[in-house]
Amino acid sequence: MTGTVAFVPDDKQPIKMLNDRLLVQVPQSEGERRSRAGILIPATAQVSKRLAWAEVVATGPNVRAIEAGDQVLFNPEDRFEVEVRGDDYLILRERDIHAVASPRLDGAGTGLYL
């Protein structure tokens, strides 16, 4: 397995993730959110044990079940932040991922849809 390489726009060198690491990007909309009743919840509000979704940009060679482009569910407390060319990314370990959402998994899971 070789893993995937992330080509960041206007980059002079590609980024290769090592071992079981994932490079993910959290959507900008993850900051503020609305409750079902329509109440605006600011990004600074503390919500205990709330998991977050992010898109996988690159994977290390030892990552087995996740590919670039997948959406992953993770605990925001189990992460390392990095800035690459002005964009913010997170580095996670595959074992810290709670769920994966991807069209390629259709029919291969538990039958639950998120």
Image (tube, rainbow, N blue to C red):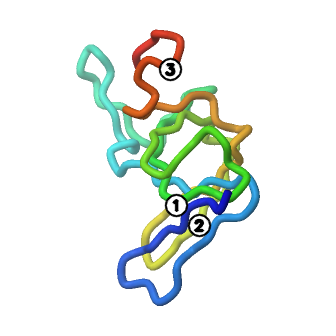
Query: How far apart, in angstroms, are the residues tagged by discs 3 and 2?
Result: 33 Å
Q: Residue at x 62, y 59 (%)?
A: 3
Q: Which residue is mark 2?
A: 82
Dot 1: element? strand
Which circle's residue, 3 or 1, is located before the other in the chain? 1
Q: Would you say the residues marked 3 and 2 are in contact, meaning their CB atoms lie under 8 Å apart?
A: no
The x and y percentages for residue 30 are: 39, 42
The x and y percentages for residue 103 are: 37, 32
Q: Type of residue at label 2?
A: Val
**Residue 87 in the image: above or below residue 67:** below
Q: Would you say the residues marked 1 and 2 are in contact, meaning their CB atoms lie under 8 Å apart?
A: yes
* Residue 85: quarter of image: bottom left
Q: Looking at the image, which residue sits at the far top?
A: 111
Residue 44's disc number: none
Q: Quadrant of the C terminus?
A: top left
- Residue closer to the observer: 23 or 67: 67
Query: How far apart, in angstroms, are the residues tagged by discs 1 and 2?
Result: 5 Å
Q: Type of residue at label 1?
A: Tyr
Which circle's residue, 3 or 2, is located before the other in the chain? 2
Residue 89's disc number: 1
Query: How far apart, in angstroms, are the residues tagged by discs 3 and 1?
Result: 29 Å
Q: Which residue is mark 3?
A: 108
**Residue 8 in the image: above or below residue 80:** below
* Residue 71: quarter of image: top left
- Residue closer to the observer: 25 or 16: 16
Q: Residue at x 59, y 66 (%)?
A: 82
